[in-house]
Image (cartoon, grey):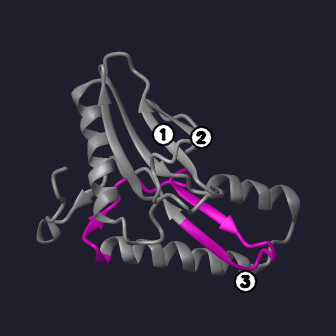
Amino acid sequence: TEGLHSRIFRFKDEHKNFDNCADAGGALAMKILTDQFPEPEQISQLENEYKISQHLSKFKFIRPALNFVKKEGQYAIYFDWAEGITLKEWIGNVERTTKNPRLEHAVNLALKISEAFVELHDSGVIHNNITVDNIIVKESKNYDKFSVKIIGLGLASLLSHHDCVSEK
């Protein structure tokens, strides 16, 4: 997956460097900045994404951030892999595969997305970049239940009365 200044790679933790990753069968995501000489704002957004993800780590709707790495001018965050597809892809699949999607499925998904953002806001975080590309949807095999992950927290803000993000 690619963003404007970042790229995400999926890989298996063969050496068990991150014992606490279990969501996607040990799969991890590594988000790196792609610019050879990243701007301070790009680095700051990546650091912010790590800090906000750490703040929200107990919530099921966030992929946990496992580590922030700066090595030889390269910056990266390691996350648990978020299984599923983007909301944009889900909408495209529904449009391609059926002329009349079941209303109850769309309502169930909208409810899950709403619940995720309620938890996000209740924890003092404002996303600031909600798009269909920053919501990961995983459907059950019966296509009647959903789980949702909110990603892309680089522009997120922590409200001042919740200003408890620890410096690591």
The single residue placed furthest to the front in the displayed view is 15
User: Residue 60, relative to residue 86: is it above or below?
Assistant: below
Among numbered discs 2 and 1, the one appearing first in the sequence: 2
Task: Residue 79: give x, y in percent of width and height.
Answer: 45, 50
Q: Is residue 162 left or right of residue 75?
A: left
The single residue placed furthest to the top in the displayed view is 36
Label 2 and label 1: CA atoms lie apart by: 8 Å
Q: Which mark is residue 11?
A: 2
Q: Return the residue nearer the eye: 93 or 24.
A: 24
Query: CB of mark 2 within 8 Å of CB of mark 3?
Result: no
Kind of element beneath mark 2: strand
Residue 62, magenta (yes or no): no
Residue displayed at 32% across by 72% down = 121
Among numbered discs 2 and 3, the one appearing first in the sequence: 2
Residue under label 1, please give it: 30
Kind of element beneath mark 1: strand
Task: Residue 127: give x, y in percent of width and height.
Answer: 35, 59
Q: Which mark is residue 138?
A: none
Query: CB of mark 2 within 8 Å of CB of mark 1?
Result: yes
Q: Is residue 164 left or right of residue 53?
A: left
- Where, quadrant-wise, is the N terminus in this rendering? top right
Residue displayed at 12% across by 72% down = 161
> In the rendered structure, which segment of residues is drawn in magenta?
122-148
- The quadrant in which residue 24 appears is bottom right
Q: Which mark is residue 104?
A: 3
Kind of element beneath mark 3: helix
Task: Residue 117: give x, y in percent of width and height.
Answer: 42, 71
Task: Residue 63: give x, y in percent of width and height.
Answer: 47, 59
